[in-house]
């Protein structure tokens, strides 16, 4: 009996985890995965619906299944009221999350307070809206402010080329417009702790998915004003904040001195990475790290001048920085080796 119960739990967990991907086809996908009949899957679907874990709409052929939010809440705050992120977390957010593993609570505590503090200190807005939605599988929190916009703020403060360049700087880490009060680590680590992390500000959209090479920029219709940040995390993930921090530390001081930079973020639209000016944008602030790993995922070519600026000029003047690369295709690797040979 216990084996049957264990198998049933696995089937229902699979349904809950995958219904978002296959809302109209989850019965077929589950039947194929576990080699059981559609009728058997339907019994599990009915149980999940009866337990208020899922909803269903439509008739037999057009049925669509969705996770039912167990918690759905919205809070409105005035930034003129001396808002404190830890107070909002303790009094409003933490109680609504319910019972969760300590590692999951730690990630939410870090991520929520960092993003809310960033809005309080830097947005120059007047209000912020917080939305929380929790299902049987995951929790999502979104924060919206009506300020200047995070990418515009960084562009103006650091005199960058445009808002898209702000995304590249955020992806590197150690970026702050107020070094006396902030280390520049908050958004970097927050974006890497969650299953899905997104920022929309102005016409620029930044996304990072855990375990994937998903740092990217997408221009889209203008966001009216301010910044929107979305975070999503599995309610039972084994990930820990400590492991995420450790991934970007090296040496005896255990400081934030290692970064992975998505090179594709230096490439705008269909532009090719060929110029020294593009390379200089890429390597800006590398001197703040001991180890820099350049991730060439999605880059199909680089030019001689670009490679020379990074791997000869920069490396020659900064021999103390360990510079390496990953996910490069053969043509990119050949250009890198050529530049290194002239050092």
Image (tube, rainbow, N blue to C red):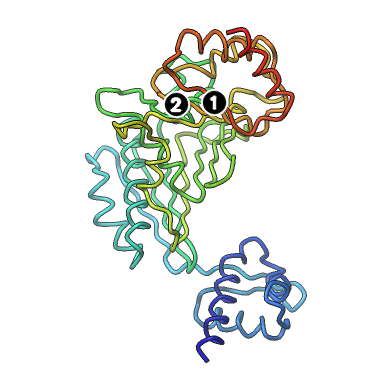
Secondary element type, mark 1: strand
| Disc on the earlier residue, 1 or 2 | 2
Residue 276 rendering spot, x and y as whole percentages? 61, 9
- The number of numbered badges drawn on the structure is 2
Task: Specify whether 49 is left or right of 248.
Answer: right
Task: Specify whether 266 is left or right of 174.
Answer: right
Residue 338 rendering spot, x and y as whole percentages? 67, 14
Q: Quadrant of the C terminus?
A: top right
User: Contact, CB < 8 Å: mark 1 with mark 2?
Assistant: yes
Q: Residue at x 50, y 9 (%)?
A: 316
The label shown at residue 340 is: none
Q: Please say whether residue 124 is visible from this viewpoint.
A: no
Q: Residue at x 53, y 79 (%)?
A: 9
Residue 160 rendering spot, x and y as whole percentages? 49, 16
Residue 152 rendering spot, x and y as whole percentages? 47, 24
Along the line of sight, the residue nearer the viewer: 294 or 179:
294
Name the residue that disc number 2 marks. Answer: 291
Along the line of sight, the residue nearer the viewer: 317 or 123:
317
Secondary element type, mark 2: strand
Q: Residue at x 49, y 31 (%)?
A: 171
Q: Vertical placement of 328 versus 3: above or below? A: above
Q: Residue at x 59, y 23 (%)?
A: 266
Q: Vertical placement of 139 versus 11: above or below? A: above
Q: Residues within 10 Å of mark 1 (few under 14, many from 20)?
A: few
Q: Vertical placement of 217 versus 58: above or below? A: above
Outermost residue toward the right in this view: 61
Q: Please say whether residue 274 is visible from this viewpoint.
A: yes
Q: Residues within 10 Å of mark 2 (few under 14, many from 20)?
A: many
Q: Dividing the picture into quarters, in which one does residue 58 lie? A: bottom right
Name the residue that disc number 1 marks. Answer: 324
Q: Dividing the picture into quarters, in which one does residue 203 lie? A: top right
């Amino acid at each position: 009996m216990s084996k049957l119960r264990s198998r049933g739990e696995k089937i229902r967990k699979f349904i809950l985890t995958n219904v978002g991907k296959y809302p109209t086809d989850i019965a077929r996908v589950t039947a194929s995965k576990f080699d059981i009949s559609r009728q058997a899957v339907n019994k599990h679907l009915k149980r999940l619906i009866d337990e208020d874990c899922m909803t269903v709409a439509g008739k037999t052929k057009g049925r669509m299944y969705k996770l039912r939010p167990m918690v759905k809440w919205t809070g409105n705050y005035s930034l003129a009221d001396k808002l404190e992120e830890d107070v909002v977390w303790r009094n409003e957010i933490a109680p609504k999350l319910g019972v969760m593993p300590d590692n999951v609570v730690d990630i939410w505590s870090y991520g929520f307070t960092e993003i809310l503090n960033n809005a309080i200190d830097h947005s120059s807005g007047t209000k912020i809206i917080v939305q929380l939605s929790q299902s049987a599988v995951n929790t999502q929190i979104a924060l919206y402010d009506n300020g200047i916009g995070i990418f515009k703020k960084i562009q103006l403060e650091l005199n960058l080329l445009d808002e898209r360049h702000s995304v590249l700087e955020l992806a590197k880490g150690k970026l702050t417009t107020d070094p006396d009060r902030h280390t520049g680590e908050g958004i970097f680590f927050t974006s890497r702790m969650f299953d899905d992390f997104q920022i929309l500000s102005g016409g620029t959209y930044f996304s990072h998915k855990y375990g994937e090479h998903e740092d990217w920029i997408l221009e889209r219709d203008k966001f009216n004003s301010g910044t929107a940040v979305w975070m999503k995390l599995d309610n039972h993930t084994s990930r820990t904040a400590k492991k995420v921090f450790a991934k970007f530390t090296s040496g005896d001081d255990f400081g934030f001195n290692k970064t992975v930079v998505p090179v594709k973020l230096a490439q705008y639209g269909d532009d090719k990475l060929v110029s020294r000016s593009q390379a200089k944008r890429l390597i800006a602030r590398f001197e703040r790290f001991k180890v820099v790993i350049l991730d060439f995922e999605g880059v199909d070519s680089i030019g001689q001048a670009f490679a020379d600026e990074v791997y000869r000029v920069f490396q020659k003047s900064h021999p103390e920085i360990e510079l390496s690369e990953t996910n490069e295709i053969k043509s990119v690797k050949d250009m890198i080796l050529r530049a290194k040979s002239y050092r």
